[in-house]
Image (tube, rainbow, N blue to C red):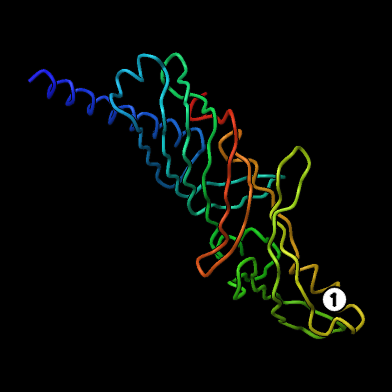
Amino acid sequence: MLGALFAGVDRWAVNYAENRLAERIQARQGLAGSTEVDIHGFPFLTQALSHDLEQVDVKLDGVQAVSDGRKTRLSQLNATFRGVKLNGDYSGGTARRAEGTALVTYRDLTEASQTGVTVTYGGAPGKVKVTAAVEVLGRRLAPSVVSTVTLVDAPGGTKTVRVRADDIPGAGLPGVESAVRKQTDFDRRLDGGLPAGLKLDTLTSDESGVHLTLSGTNVALAGS
């Protein structure tokens, strides 16, 4: 009886803590989408009393990454926080380490380009197709180019998502390549809006969008 009662109280406590953390994360990240939190380990109450959590999984929808005044929406961000040290009022904490994945859909990447192009899948991992509208020598063109999407180093130890066309149709004609690249090639930083301490590691693409992996140490969780 006592064991069952303790287990019931422990489950109630962990559910309450998960909901509270989800609310804090939602507010901290300024999310328009949903937030789900899953705290691992049993019993939870023992972890809570010591202010140490073994593992916390967080699923975020609709994260707005902002850098240089430009927004890039991450459709999904799933992260696992390990070795979380809770702060005094249990409103958040800091994870010893964390790793995760994020998805940028082609619709969101199109909006992030801010050049009026349309971005779709390029038919192979790490490739996207970019369609632009440009005017060259009085003629209006709508070329589609296959581009490589990569992560490159940015100031401050962060990473930038870079889209560069592999080849430009009609590049031998005066002014064509520069006019097309001005529309199709772009960089976007995603460091602002991610949980503090979480950094981009790798990138690839498939039919659903651009997939990112992330990791970090001393990563902020919610209110810390």
In x, y percent, where is residue 102? 53, 51
Q: Which image quarter: residue 143?
A: bottom right
- Picture mark count: 1
* In front of the other: 127 or 1: 1
Image point 71% across, 42% down: which residue? 158
Q: Residue furthest left?
A: 1
Q: SS class of the residue under badge 1?
A: helix
Q: Which residue lies furthest to the right in this view?
A: 174
Q: Which amino acid type is shown beneath numbered disc 1?
A: Glu
Assess disc 1: are there few (<14), some (14-19) or many (≥20) residues with their C-alpha within 10 Å of its C-alpha: some
Horizontal arrangement in the rendering, residue 185 relative to residue 59 (left or right)? right
Q: Which image quarter: residue 171?
A: bottom right
Q: Which image quarter: residue 193?
A: top right
From the image, tell me which residue sits under label 1: 177
Horizontal arrangement in the rendering, residue 125 relative to residue 40 (left or right)? right
Horizontal arrangement in the rendering, residue 34 relative to residue 155 (left or right)? left
In x, y percent, where is residue 97? 54, 32
* In front of the other: 95 or 60: 95
Placement of the N terminus among the 4 image quadrants: top left
In x, y percent, where is residue 190? 64, 47
Image point 67% across, 49% down: which residue? 70
Q: Does 44 sit above or below residue 89?
A: below
Q: Does 213 sit above or below residue 167?
A: above
Image point 92% across, 81% down: which residue? 174
